[in-house]
Amino acid sequence: MLIDGHGRKVNYLRISVTERCNFRCLYCMPEKPFSWVPHENLLSYEDMFEFVKVSIDEGIDKIRITGGEPLLRHGLDTFIKMISDYKNDIDLAITTNGYLLEETAQDLKDAGLKRLNISLDSLTPEIAQKISQKDMLEKVLKGIDKAQEVGLKIKINCVPLKDINDGEIINLLDHCKLKGYEIRFIEFMENSYAKVKQGLSSQEIQDIIKQKYNFTKGIREGSSPSRTYTLEDGYKFGIIEPHLDDFCKDCNRIRLTAEGFLIPCLYFEDAMSIREAIKDKDIKKASSILKDVLKDKPEKNKWGSENGSDRAFYETGG
Ligand code: SAM
Ligand code: SF4
C-alpha cells in the first residue's frame, strides 16, 4: 500500500501520454505552445508500462489516461491492453475531448477499456467552438454515441465559464440525464495559460440548477474529488470543487507526465523523473522514486502564482 507523508492512501495514477492537443480550449491551451516536447523525449508505451507494473505492484488500483488529447497518440489501444492484461480488474479510464472517438471507440473497448470521461462544455455549436476554438461539436457528439454503442460507460466533464457557457448548464444536465451519462461540472482552476476571466463557483452552478430542479446536499464519496448531488428523480450529478477547503483532504492521486516526471500535486512545482530508472530497467529505483515523491506530496495544493498554476494542465493531464 502506498501512503503519503500526510498519512493519505494513494491508489490512483493519472498518466498523461501526450501534451499535444487538437483543441485550443480557452481555459487550458488557448494557444499552441512555443514548442512541443520532441517525440524522442517521450516515454514509450513500453516504458510507461514498466512504471505502471511497479505502481500496481505497490498498490495503485485506479489508472486514468489523459493528456493533452490522449487519442492523438498512436497505439493507445495497445497500451490499454497491456495494462488490462496485467490487472484485469483495474479501474482503468481515459479522459478525452471525444473528437477522435468515433474511429477509436471499438478498438479501445476491445483492448479492455470500460470507462471514458469526455469533456463537453456546450451543446450549442457556436459556444462549443468559442471555447475549444474548433468546429467540433457534431463530430464529438457522434464519437460519444459510438462509445456508448460499443458499451463504454460514459461520464461527461464540463467547465462552466462566466458569460460563455453558463447558460448551457441545464441543457447539458438534461442531455446527460436523458442519455444516461453522469455529468460532473468542474470549477475553473486558475492557471497562467488560460484566457478566461472567470469560472463559476460550485455555489453558482448549484444556483443555476436550482432554477429547475430540487436536489440533495452534496456528498463526497471516498476520495473522489467531486461532491455528488441527487435530483428528486434519483439522477446524480457531480461538482468538482477545488476552491473548497476540504478538496485536498483525501487526495489519493499522483501524476506521470509523458516525459516521465512524477508529480505529486497539480499545484506544486516539484517533480521527480523516473525516466532513467525505467530506461535502465531499475525497478527498485523506480519504486523508491515513487515513494520519495509521495513523501513530498503537499498536504494542500499551493496555488503558486497569482494566476494559480504555472504548470500547464495539458502537460499534467488536468
Ligand atoms: N484533452 C482531454 C480532455 O479535454 O478531456 C484530456 C486532458 S484535459 C487537460 C483533462 C480535464 O481537465 C478536462 O476535463 C478539462 O476540462 C479539464 N481542465 C483543463 N483545464 C482546466 C481548468 N483550467 N480548470 C478546470 N478544468 C480544466
Ligand atoms: Fe485539449 Fe483537453 Fe486542454 Fe481542451 S482541455 S485544450 S481538449 S487538453
Image (cartoon, rainbow, N blue to C red):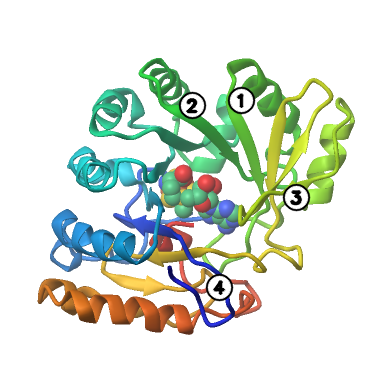
Q: Do the residues bearing badges 2 and 4 touch, measured as CB atoms within 8 Å?
A: no
- Disc 2 marks which amino acid? Leu
The residue wearing badge 4 is 267
Under circle 4, the secondary element is loop
For marks 1 and 2, give the CA distance. 8 Å
> Is residue 55 something one can see in this rendering?
yes
Q: Do the residues bearing badges 1 and 4 touch, measured as CB atoms within 8 Å?
A: no
Q: Is residue 163 above or below residue 62?
A: above
For marks 2 and 3, give the CA distance. 22 Å
The residue wearing badge 2 is 137
The residue wearing badge 1 is 124
Residue depicted at x 67% and y 61%: 242
Under circle 1, the secondary element is loop
Q: Do the residues bearing badges 1 and 3 touch, measured as CB atoms within 8 Å?
A: no
Q: Do the residues bearing badges 3 and 4 touch, measured as CB atoms within 8 Å?
A: no
Residue depicted at x 36% and y 62%: 33
In primary-sequence order, the first of circles 1 and 4 is 1
Under circle 3, the secondary element is loop
User: Given this view, does label 2 or label 3 mark the residue nearer the observer?
Assistant: 3
132 left or right of 51 in image: right
The residue wearing badge 3 is 200
Quarter of the image with the N terminus in it: bottom left
For marks 2 and 4, give the CA distance. 31 Å
Q: Residue furthest front?
A: 1
Under circle 2, the secondary element is helix
Q: Is residue 52 above or below residue 219?
A: below
Residue depicted at x 36% and y 41%: 89
Residue 211 in the image: state x and y as whole percent. 89, 30
- Disc 1 marks which amino acid? Thr
For marks 1 and 3, give the CA distance. 19 Å
User: Given this view, does label 2 or label 4 mark the residue nearer the observer?
Assistant: 4
